[in-house]
Image (cartoon, grey):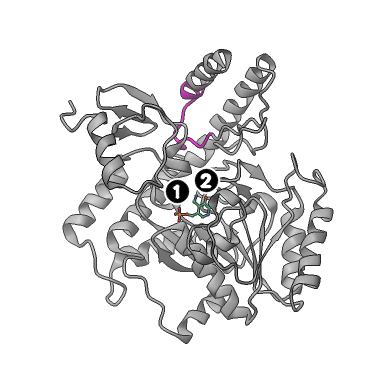
Amino acid sequence: PYDGPSAADIARKRAEYLSPSLFHFYSKPLNIVEGKRQYLYDEHGRRYLDAFAGIATVCCGHCHPDVVDAITAQSKRLQHSTVLYLNHAIADFAEALASKLPGDLKVVFFTNSGTEANELAILMARLYTGSHDIISLRNSYHGNAAGTMGATAQKNWKFNVIQSGVHHAVNPDPYRGAFGNDAEKYVRDVQEIIEFGTTGQVAGFISEAIQGVGGIVEVSPGYLPLAYEKVRKAGGLCIADEVQAGFARVGSHFWGFETHGVVPDIVTMAKGIGNGIPLGAVVTTPEIAQVLTRRCYFNTFGGNPLCTAGGLAVLMVLEKEKLQENAFVVGSYLKDRLRGLQEKHENMEVLVGKGGFGYGNVFRMGNVFRITPPLCFTKEDADFFVEVMDIALSKL
Ligand code: PMP
């Protein structure tokens, strides 16, 4: 039983000592004291089904025993060393991660977050090409440091930073976008940005395959191959931000970009890669990776033994428990069940998704309900979720 401070005590401390920018969505926020796979427990031992997974992060479930064992064992041996010395944990994980990527994408640089990964990717694209201009999509989210905040294109997440050389292209949103599903029309905007907003040469293009923070917007089918072609013709590199969509979540594939049949030049990842441990990575080709040797580039915690031992365990769990397949099967089932619910509740629409988790089930009448559960979600969990949703929608 939990004998820690009460929810009220924690809320009081939080109000006094933590940044006023922190927000929650509840009049009475939950005090979560424990997590086990897809379930969370409050201080009274009450169980909750987690359908958000810390924003698409806890992919193999909370406190997965294999991940806990890997971190614990590594923690007892060596927690920190920096890449100045050799350690097997970082090398083993880099090798395993590279094996999940197509083509020549095999050189890994570890970071501590998605923001850092995207900052580094943008830097590398600029160094490699000698150009400065970056094209990102409206409604995207790429991070909260200056460069990535510039690339982000949603006003809620932007402060007054200098947006150096960033252009936001019309969002290829098949549902609400100006051109519906017409990928060629959307791509014309990319071409016009290149022609009218730059020297004709760009550093790169960054996009999510499915915009997560933007409300589960899956970019129009056919768009990415065409956009990549235009950008590459203008000398730019194509960066896939897989921070939310990656790591088996889409079910049909391991990475979101694979569902569009493209191979990026740089892939960035975080969230699911560590199942909750602070971990991010940039993966690119040996040739592009060379650009960082021109100066010293260093990250104190990036690739530390603790996080990389945990990351390797996460990859092994995904494989051992066939969680990508589960995301596909249970995600498709959940989507079908939500479609059934849609017939009953007229304000609800179930949209998008390849059958994977979270990336499948939203409704959108000014509001999007994002569902991004741990990939170990079961059919019984999906049934429970839909029943609760039905009751909640009826009350609304
Ligand atoms: N890219 C995407 C697609 C994201 O969703 C996020 C986080 N919401 C980030 C980048 C930034 O990741 P982090 O919060 O780890 O810095």
Examine the residues drawn in magenta and state their main secondary structure.
loop
Magenta stretch: give its range.
371-382
Please indicate whether residue 14 sits to the left or right of residue 131 in the image: left
Pointer 2 residue: 248
Question: Image quadrant of residue 374?
Answer: top left
Name the residue type under label 2: Ala
Please indicate whether residue 272 sits to the left or right of residue 63 in the image: right
Q: Residue 116, image x and y in percent?
A: 45, 63
Is 385 located above or below residue 242 in the figure? above
Q: Give the mark nearest the N terminus, 2 or 1.
A: 2
Q: Counting other residues with Cα less than 10 Å from the Cα at mark 2, is it few (<14), some (14-19), or many (20 or more)?
A: many
Q: Nearer the viewer, mark 2 or mark 1?
A: 1
Q: Residue at x 41, y 78 (%)?
A: 297
Please indicate whether residue 32 sits to the left or right of residue 60 in the image: left
Q: Residue 383, image x and y in percent?
A: 51, 19
Q: Which mark is residue 272?
A: 1
Q: Residue at x 16, y 56 (%)?
A: 76
Q: Residue at x 17, y 25 (%)?
A: 1
Q: How many marks?
A: 2
Dot 1: what SS? Answer: helix
Q: Residue at x 53, y 68 (%)?
A: 121
Please indicate whether residue 120 sits to the left or right of residue 170 in the image: left
Name the residue type under label 1: Gly
Dot 2: what SS? Answer: loop
Q: Are marks 2 and 1 in contact (CB under 8 Å)?
A: yes
Q: Residue 329, image x and y in percent?
A: 56, 32
